[in-house]
């Protein structure tokens, strides 16, 4: 049985310029025990989907089932089987990381002994031991986020919704969180994670979906998505070239203050030589999930909508 099944799921908001569809007839299946990634730019519909699937928001039309249970009509039953890190979540500033985790487990029905032992384990695993007794008001944003994620991962819930769980964390902390997420899946949880870090999606997920403008454009593995890119190599130039000059070599995108071109191996030497002659910094590497996302969506995951909208 699928852990999650969405059918023709839509959510329409009334905006300044009329009605805006945050989700438009989305169909999505997530298998039980899967670590599933949901990728999209701000405003693409990721957070709206999570809010509906977790019973926090009512859809305009369509349905979502979790473990065969209709979320809209049996929301209390669903909430007993899930845990969620919301994108806009904040800790209680007067509580320490240890208190956050232990109190959360007690509220969910764990015994005092189980809550204490689980808290000790998760605090160590998340690298929070040096800060375990520090009130959240004195913690950095990254440590506050780590505390919220620790609460949810400690729950052992059947389905975990992680909306941008490593936002604001340093690279070392992110990898610690990845390990704990993997452990949760091995222990039997199904995980839906949204992330702006494409390396995170590539490293973690069994399968992923790309959403843009409320539509799911792709569902499958990261490797299969990368295989859709017709070029083999990416070169990034820190200025010095025009789009017109690079277009004959392959697909060209503006990013990070320069231009990126995706091309074939046979053109790399010519391009790097031209960059050296112009004294322009150039970075060469294999095509990544970021390039696959650019090819599919037409713009970077970091590029926001010109107009605000639901996320």
Image (tube, rainbow, N blue to C red):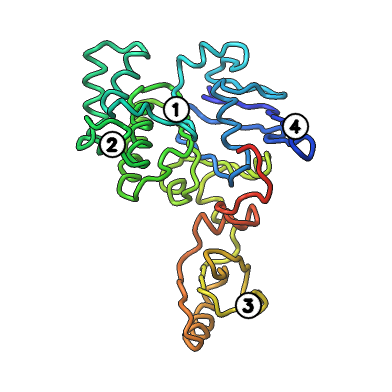
Query: How many other residues sit within 10 Å of disc 3, few (<14), some (14-19) or many (≥20)?
Result: few
Choose the circle earlier in sequence order: 2 or 4: 4
For disc 3, the marked residue is 242
Structural distance between the alpha carbons of marks 1 and 4: 30 Å
Q: Which mark is residue 160?
A: 1
The secondary element bearing badge 1 is classed as strand
Q: Which mark is residue 126?
A: 2
For disc 4, the marked residue is 14
Structural distance between the alpha carbons of marks 1 and 2: 17 Å
Work out which quarter of the rendered image holds the C terminus and state it: top right
Structural distance between the alpha carbons of marks 2 and 4: 41 Å
Choose the circle earlier in sequence order: 4 or 3: 4
Q: Tell me: 1 left or right of 121.
A: right
Query: How many other residues sit within 10 Å of disc 4, few (<14), some (14-19) or many (≥20)?
Result: few
- Furthest residue toward right: 18
Q: Nearer the viewer, mark 1 or mark 2?
A: 2
Structural distance between the alpha carbons of marks 2 and 3: 46 Å
Q: Nearer the viewer, residue 26 or 15?
A: 15
The residue drawn where x is 61% and y is 65% is: 253
């Amino acid at each position: 049985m699928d852990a999650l099944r969405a059918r023709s799921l839509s959510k329409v908001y009334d905006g300044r310029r009329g009605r805006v569809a945050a989700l438009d007839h989305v169909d999505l299946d997530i298998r039980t025990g899967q670590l599933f990634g949901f990728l999209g730019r701000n405003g693409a519909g990721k957070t709206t989907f999570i809010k509906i699937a977790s019973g926090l928001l009512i859809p305009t039309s369509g349905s979502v089932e979790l473990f065969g249970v209709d979320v809209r009509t049996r929301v209390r039953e669903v909430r007993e089987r899930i845990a969620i890190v919301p994108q806009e979540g904040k800790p209680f500033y007067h509580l320490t990381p240890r208190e956050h985790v232990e109190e959360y487990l007690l509220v969910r029905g764990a015994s005092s002994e189980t809550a204490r032992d689980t808290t000790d384990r998760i605090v160590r695993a998340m690298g929070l031991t040096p800060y375990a007794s520090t009130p959240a008001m004195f913690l950095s944003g990254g440590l506050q986020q780590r505390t919220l994620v620790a609460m949810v991962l400690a729950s052992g819930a059947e389905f975990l919704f992680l909306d941008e769980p490593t936002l604001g964390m340093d690279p070392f902390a992110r990898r610690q969180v990845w390990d704990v997420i993997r452990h949760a899946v091995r222990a039997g949880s199904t995980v839906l994670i949204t992330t702006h870090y494409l390396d995170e999606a590539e490293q973690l997920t069994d399968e992923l979906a790309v959403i843009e403008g409320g539509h799911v454009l792709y569902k499958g593995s990261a490797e299969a998505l990368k295989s859709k890119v017709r070029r083999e190599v990416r070169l990034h130039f820190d200025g010095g070239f025009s789009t017109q000059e690079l277009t004959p070599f392959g697909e060209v995108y503006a990013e990070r203050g320069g231009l990126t071109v995706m091309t074939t191996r046979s053109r790399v030497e010519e391009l790097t030589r031209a960059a050296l002659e112009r004294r322009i910094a150039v970075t060469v590497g294999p095509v990544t999930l970021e390039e696959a996302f650019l090819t599919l969506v037409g713009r970077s995951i970091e590029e926001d909508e010109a107009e605000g909208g639901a996320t």
